[in-house]
Image (cartoon, rainbow, N blue to C red):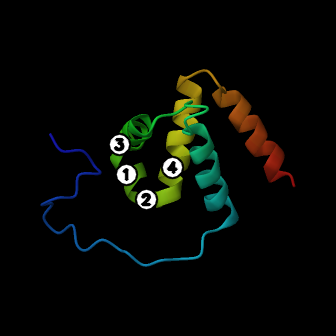
Amino acid sequence: MTRVHDRGGWPGAGPINRAEHELSWWEKRTDALMRLMWTPERRVIRVDEMRRAIESMEPGQYEKASYYERWLHALETLLIEKGVLTREEIELKVKELDKR
């Protein structure tokens, strides 16, 4: 059974967009946070866990999400699964930041 990320041989899948773009502040932060979580010193998250979290996204959500939106989804999912943060803590911080 293929999953949403498995593009090989999909009819009409079209070419992969390989265009580069300047990363936004939140993309840079997401990248930095994820890299901190999987450093050998911390090992809070492993690369294979990240991949599983991304691949478990709902197909519609996966299709609409950008590269770093998928990373952010994985980071949130894994930190909640591991008990590092709760969904409520994340939502509270998002509300706090939205007020700024």
Can you tell which quarter of the image residue 17 is in?
Answer: bottom left
**Which corner quadrant of the image does residue 27 belong to?**
bottom right
Disc nearer the start of the sequence (3/2): 3
Q: CA distance from mark 4 to mark 3?
A: 11 Å
Q: Nearer the viewer, mark 1 or mark 4?
A: 4
The answer to whether mark 3 and mark 2 are in CB contact below 8 A is no
Q: Position of residue 99 (x, y in %)?
A: 85, 51
How many numbered discs?
A: 4
> Depth check: 17 or 36 in front?
36
Q: CA distance from mark 3 to mark 2?
A: 14 Å
Is the residue under label 2 in contact with that under label 4 (CB below 8 Å)?
no
Q: Amino acid at mark 4?
A: Trp
The residue at which mark 2 appears reads as 64
- Considering the numbered disc 1 on the image, is that residue within a helix, a strand or a loop? helix
Task: Name the amino acid type tagged 3.
Answer: Glu
Q: Amino acid at mark 1?
A: Gly
Q: Which residue, as the protein is rendered here, is positioned at the far right?
A: 100
Residue that carries the numbered disc 3 in the rendered image: 55
Q: Which label lies toward us, 4 or 2?
A: 4
Question: Residue at horizontal 56%, vertical 23%?
Answer: 82
Of residue 11 and residue 45, the one placed in the foreground of this image is 45
Looking at the figure, which quarter contains the N terminus? top left
Residue at image mark 1: 60
Badge 2: how crowded within 10 Å, few (<14), some, or many (20+)?
few
Disc nearer the start of the sequence (4/3) = 3
Badge nearest the viewer, 1 or 3: 3
**With respect to residue 33, does 80 lie above or below?**
above
Real-space Cα distance between discs 4 and 2?
A: 13 Å
Quote the CA–CA distance across marks 1 and 4: 16 Å
**Residue contact at pointers 2 and 1, CB within 8 angstroms:** yes
Q: Earlier in the sequence, mark 4 or mark 2?
A: 2
